[in-house]
Image (spheres, rainbow, N blue to C red):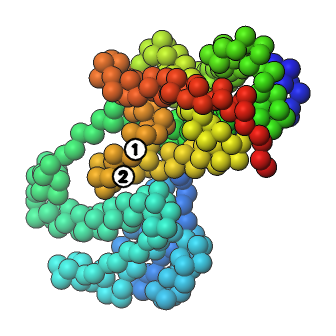
């Protein structure tokens, strides 16, 4: 504990940086979904119909019409300059062809460099083009004497009754912060675990450390890492109180499931860091491997890109990352409220990461007693 308080690296990596990460991600996505994304319009038709569609597009929550362009080339240049995420193009004669049922071509262009912004702008632009034809069809059928029920059945033969489970608001904060923030915390746990053991070698304290544990490496490791577990657990519990009680993130699962997941997250991450140092008893190499493993976890956890869409060898590799098991346990038990037995494989996976240091105990002890630190 004196080492933890004396070295500022521990303060930064165990409290300051995780707290900053927590505040950064949760405030970055505090609106839940992106709003008022800038889009443009190329309206060469310039009729009351086309202007009405532009006003409807501007009224959407996700899109905001910020500019009108004289040509497609100008709008495309603005999109390439990241001034807008997409634009809608009405060629001349659109309304005339629409009223005479000659199927005018209305085009929309969007940039998918930002996946979230591109998909949301695409949805709004596609909706507007659909609404244009529906409005004309509705007016024509009303003039022919059709009832509102007949018009509705013709324009929308199948009505979708949408119920989004657990997150009916489509809040991106609930989807992303619940995996990014724990992922960064797990990365710090990997690094601090390897760093803590490597510093014993660097300052030649390994023999003294083992001697104080009466030559018992298990006691030595427990004595060293129990304060780490306590500090990280307090940090995780604060994070969970913040997202569930202050930000009101959806959590169908019970309190004890959340507590168990937090405990498994901490001890599995620290166990993995100890295991990596045991494989490579070198401060620099073990921290490098932990950094690589932690960064790859974000891609292979399955939150940004689904695992079933990956190649088969990559799917097999995902089981080697603690964040993958944490994410699946969170999704199954906390977010969707299913019992732990439905996620037993991932529960066993985190327990296995916790037990990994048992395979390298002798090597860690040998390193502390005989290895010479090489910068």
- Name the quadrant containing residue 142: bottom left
Direction from residue 35 to residue 169 in the image, left or right = left
Q: Crowdedness of circle 2 by 10 Å Cα count: few (<14), some, many (20+)?
A: few
Q: Is residue 36 visible?
A: yes
Q: In this view, does 119 lie above or below 189?
A: below
Q: Is residue 209 above or below residue 322?
A: above
- Identify residue for label 1: 318
Q: Which residue is drawn at 61% across and 41% down?
A: 280
Closer to us: 75 or 194 = 194
Closer to us: 190 or 53 = 190
Q: Which residue is drawn at 46% across and 60% down?
A: 115
Closer to us: 40 or 200 = 200
Closer to us: 53 or 309 = 309
Q: Which residue lies furthest to the front in this view?
A: 370
Which label is found at residue 314?
2
Q: Is residue 168 above or below residue 255?
A: below
Which label is found at residue 205?
none
Q: Which residue is drawn at 45% across and 16% down?
A: 257
The reply to whether the C-beta atoms of the residues labelled 2 and 1 are less than 8 Å apart is yes
Direction from residue 6 to residue 22 in the image, left or right = left
Q: Which residue is drawn at 17% across and 78% down?
A: 101
Q: Crowdedness of circle 1 by 10 Å Cα count: few (<14), some, many (20+)?
A: many
- Name the quadrant containing residue 232: top right
Q: Residue furthest right?
A: 6
> Where's residue 106, x and y in %?
32, 78
């Amino acid at each position: 504990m004196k080492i933890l308080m004396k070295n500022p690296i521990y303060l930064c990596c165990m409290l300051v940086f995780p707290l900053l990460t927590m505040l950064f991600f949760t405030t970055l996505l505090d609106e839940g979904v992106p709003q008022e994304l800038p889009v443009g319009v190329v309206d060469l038709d310039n009729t009351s119909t086309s202007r009405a569609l532009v006003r409807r597009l501007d009224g959407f929550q996700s899109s905001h019409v910020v500019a009108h362009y004289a040509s497609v080339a100008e709008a495309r240049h603005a999109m390439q300059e990241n001034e807008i995420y997409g634009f809608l193009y009405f060629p001349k004669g659109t309304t005339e062809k629409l009223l005479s049922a000659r199927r005018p071509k209305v085009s929309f262009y969007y940039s998918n460099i930002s996946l979230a912004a591109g998909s949301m702008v695409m949805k709004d632009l596609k909706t507007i083009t659909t609404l244009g034809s529906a409005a004309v069809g509705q007016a024509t059928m009303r003039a022919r004497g059709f009832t509102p029920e007949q018009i509705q059945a013709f324009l929308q033969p199948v009505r979708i009754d949408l119920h989004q489970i657990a997150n009916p608001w489509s809040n991106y904060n609930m989807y992303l912060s619940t995996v990014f923030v724990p992922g960064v915390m797990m990365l710090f746990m990997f690094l601090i675990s390897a760093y803590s053991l490597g510093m014993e070698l660097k300052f030649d304290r390994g023999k003294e450390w083992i001697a104080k544990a009466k030559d018992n490496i298990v006691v030595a490791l427990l004595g060293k890492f129990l304060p780490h577990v306590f500090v990280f657990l307090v940090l995780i519990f604060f994070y969970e109180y913040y997202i569930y009680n202050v930000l009101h993130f959806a959590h169908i699962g019970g309190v004890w499931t959340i507590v168990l997941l937090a405990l498994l997250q901490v001890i599995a991450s620290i166990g993995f860091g100890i295991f990596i140092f045991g494989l490579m008893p070198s401060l620099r190499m073990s921290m490098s491997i932990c950094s690589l493993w932690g960064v790859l976890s974000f891609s292979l956890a399955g939150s940004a890109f689904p695992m079933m869409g990956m190649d088969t060898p990559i799917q097999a590799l995902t089981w080697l990352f603690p964040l993958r098991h944490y994410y699946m346990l969170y999704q199954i038990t906390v977010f969707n409220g299913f019992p732990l037995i439905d996620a037993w494989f991932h529960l066993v996976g985190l327990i296995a990461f916790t037990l990994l240091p048992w395979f390298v105990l002798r090597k860690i002890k040998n390193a502390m007693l005989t290895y010479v630190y090489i910068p």
